[in-house]
Image: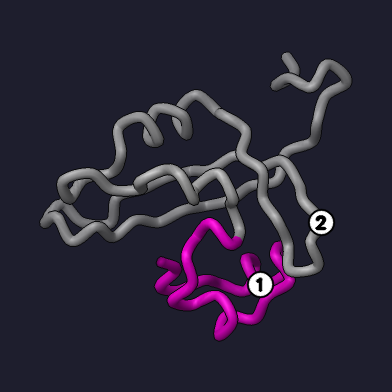
């Protein structure tokens, strides 16, 4: 669930903070509908790996348009409370559809 967001997130996705808080993250990042963000109180190791290697995620704005993004995942506590920080950064597609060089 989204616990908070900043003004940059509001501008990027086209939602007001009040429309995002307590909604599931898959509303913005559809691939997260089938990915558990946390496993046993820790960040999902596979998701952490995907973020680390620059995997591209599809992000969807309020008006239904989408864009390719990279996700930066940070664990906010080590006490097993499942608090994460997700930073979403749009990326430009290259002609070959890959990461570019």
Outermost bottom residue: 18
SS assignment at label 1: helix
Distance between mark 1 and mark 2 Cα atoms: 15 Å
Badge 2 density bin: few <14, some 14–19, many ≥20, Cα 10 Å: few
Is 29 rendered above or below residue 64? Answer: above
Colouring:
one colour
Q: How many marks?
A: 2
Q: Residue at x 45, y 44 (%)?
A: 34
Residue 65: numbered disc = 2
Quick one: 1 or 87, which is closer to the camera?
A: 1
Magenta stretch in the rendered image: 1-27
Q: Residue at x 81, y 56 (%)?
A: 65
Is 42 rendered above or below residue 4? Answer: above
Is 6 rendered above or below residue 74? Answer: below
Q: Quadrant of the N terminus?
A: bottom left
Outermost front residue: 34
Q: Is residue 4 magenta?
A: yes
Q: Residue at x 70, y 45 (%)?
A: 90
Q: Which residue is mark 1?
A: 10
Give the mark nearer the N terminus: 1 vs 2: 1
Residue 34: numbered disc = none
Q: Nearer the viewer, mark 1 or mark 2?
A: 2
Judge left or right: residue 57 versus residue 92.
left
Q: Position of residue 2 (x, y in %)?
A: 45, 68
């Amino acid at each position: 669930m989204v616990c908070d967001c900043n003004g940059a997130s509001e501008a990027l996705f086209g939602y007001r903070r009040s429309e995002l808080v307590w909604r599931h993250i898959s509303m913005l990042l559809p691939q997260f509908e089938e990915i558990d963000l946390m496993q046993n109180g820790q960040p999902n190791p596979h998701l952490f790996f995907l973020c680390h290697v620059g995997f591209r995620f599809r992000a969807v704005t309020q008006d239904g348009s989408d864009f390719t993004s990279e996700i930066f995942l940070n664990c906010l506590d080590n006490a097993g409370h499942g608090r994460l920080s997700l930073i979403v950064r749009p990326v430009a597609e290259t002609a070959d559809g890959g990461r570019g060089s």
